[in-house]
Amino acid sequence: MENKKSIRGVQITDAIRKELEDAGKSRVLTFKDRKGKQYLAHIEVGSDKLMVVPEGKYLEHRCPHCGGRIKITSKGYFCEHYFDKTDACKWHCNGILSHRFILLHEIEAYLDGHPTVLDGCFNSQGRIFSAVLVESEVYGMSLSSVVGKCPVCGEDVMVSPVAFNCSCHEKLGEPYHLTLWRHIRGHEVTLDELRELLTDGITKKEVMLMDDKGSLSKAYLRLSDDRKRIVADYNIYN
Ligand SMILES: [Zn+2]
Ligand SMILES: [Zn+2]
């Protein structure tokens, strides 16, 4: 075996040498590339010399279909069984949807069941829109602006860059009978909170809101009686 003292910034200690002799590969170690950037890899004993083999990078959450790991590639996020010859799992999310990068924490949040609104997407006509990740029939992820059902008329609620709006403005003859601003007194309304507002009319947990004096206070978010806006409920039990 090659008798190197260190390889790409990692000392070959006696312990590592023993792992290489016993198993032909080392534990996972942190290496430095030529630009000094750190990366995870292990050492393997090649035919005549030691090789540094980078670890595949995976998401923290697993594939929602098969439980496999999800690989981070230059094209996006792919179930590790995507390229299997038999029984392949086709779950994947392209790294760019509607001209927008899908960032690591955004796909993790979706897989965690607490998705976030993705702003700054734009369609082929150049119109900017906001959306959430949804799974399409072919097991790929795509974008949709539908985020719930309107408690007034039952139609879809859509997310826009500034508000959550009912999609049927005109049908009931009352335009914008449901328009909920996404920012309330300094608080950004999450999709979990929106879901609670649409089903129960009030959030389960308190949030921190700016009160009339300009200081932060705990409050529940509640739908106003006309359901046109979100109001702060500072004293729910009084
Ligand atoms: Zn899978
Ligand atoms: Zn409606």
Image (cartoon, rainbow, N blue to C red):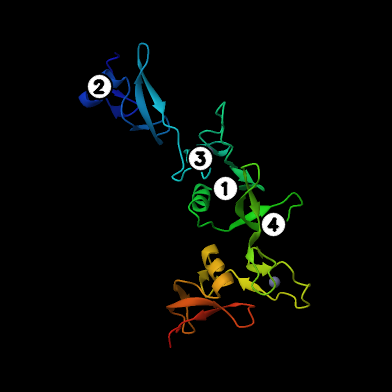
Location of mark 3 (residue): 66
Going from N to C along the chain, the mark reached first, 4 or 1, is 1
Location of mark 1 (residue): 102
Left or right of 103 on screen, residue 9: left
Callout 1: SS: loop
Residue lying at the far front in this picture: please name it.
87
Going from N to C along the chain, the mark reached first, 3 or 1, is 3
Callout 3: SS: loop
- In what quadrant does ligand 2 lie? bottom right
Location of mark 2 (residue): 17
Amino acid type, residue under disc 4 in the picture: Ile
Location of mark 4 (residue): 128
Callout 2: SS: helix
Amino acid type, residue under disc 3 in the picture: Cys
Q: CA distance from mark 4 to mark 1?
A: 16 Å
Location of residue 195 (image quadrant): bottom right
Q: CA distance from mark 2 to mark 4?
A: 56 Å
